[in-house]
Image (cartoon, rainbow, N blue to C red):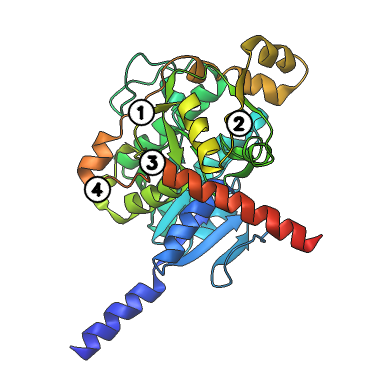
Amino acid sequence: MLKADTEIKAVKRVELHAIFGTDAVAMAVMRELHKQGKRVRMVNRSGTAAIPGNVEVVKANAADPASARQVCRGATVVYNCVNAPYTDWTEMLPPMHTAILHGAAVAGAKIVVAENLYMYGPVAGSITERLPFHPTTRKGRVRAKLAEDLMAAHYSGIVRATSGRASDFYGPGAGSQGIFGDRIVPALLAGKGVSVLGKLDVPHSYTYIEDFGKGLVMLGSHDEALGQSWHIPNSPTLTTRQMLSLFFEEARLPPNMGSIPDFVVRMLGLVKPVVREVAEMLYEFNEPFVVDSGKFVRAFGDIATPHRDAIRQTLEWYRGRKDRRQMRA
């Protein structure tokens, strides 16, 4: 019995989870794996990142097949959390996704891909995994093609694959990628007014980034998740006004919010390429955008953090970041 226990522990020690990317979503995955005591390898172009000392970070070019194969070696699960500048999705994302997929395949690892919801296009009613893809934007077409390629690789036996899809996310570490991130929270905490995209009074599902990370890890640990895509659970859908009101309440400040008119975004897009990329996604914020994650909940349970708790943790993280910056000054 003692020998068997030792062998089991040895297997747990060598289990390796490789995460491509070190931005907001990748870090959320890392935090969940680290909490579970897993061995983690993070991959980016620089080979450096602000991570715990017992987490490995290696330098690699995710778009290079040989480089991707090298860093996938020995992995049990590979998490594809790579991102690219909004303006460069068409050129940068496909080769990275292809190289990472084949790197996982050669390693005999499962692959879990972090996805968003752009592939569905405008939707009337709840957004479920059963919907056909109907992208109406450049970035939506990229996401649809990558999602199709992933499932095609799984069902052709190339790799064991699954994906987790999240709505616009927020939370600790979300930074400039967070919908309620660097552009919103610091200004709010400073007592200033904040403005967001789209209509304030239409319902919109928002994902807490820690739930996104936890959900992706859960998909990687359950073989029954393979060959399918899953919507990561969100707390009950609120309007954007209601969400921002919670932020102001938790910050103990009077609400001071507005929305940026669509025509302003489109006009800025004429001279700023990144704003032009934002403008094509405005449909998500002008009509109800309600995500159904019942499939995940029925299979694995409801992991959604209540919005008020998630917002409180987000504000605490931003306050802590401000304090750390002041200490370094």
The residue under the point 69% across, 33% down is: 192
Q: Which residue is mark 4?
A: 300
Q: Which mark is residue 89?
A: 2
Comparing 306 with 136, the one in front is 306
Measure the alpha-carbon separation of dots 1 and 2. 24 Å
Callouts 3 and 1 close, C-beta under 8 Å: no
Which mark sits nearer the N-terminus, 1 or 2?
Answer: 2
For badge 3, the amino acid type reads Gly
For badge 2, the amino acid type reads Trp
Residue 12's place in the image compared with 197, above or below, is: below
User: Which mark is nearer the camera, 3 or 4?
Assistant: 4
Q: Which residue is mark 1?
A: 291
Q: Position of residue 317 (x, y in %)?
A: 58, 53
Quadrant of the image containing the C terminus: bottom right
Farthest residue to the bottom: give it: 2
Q: Quadrant of the rendered structure where residue 1 is?
A: bottom left
Which mark sits nearer the N-terminus, 3 or 4?
Answer: 3
Callouts 3 and 4 close, C-beta under 8 Å: no
Q: Position of residue 225 (x, y in %)?
A: 27, 46
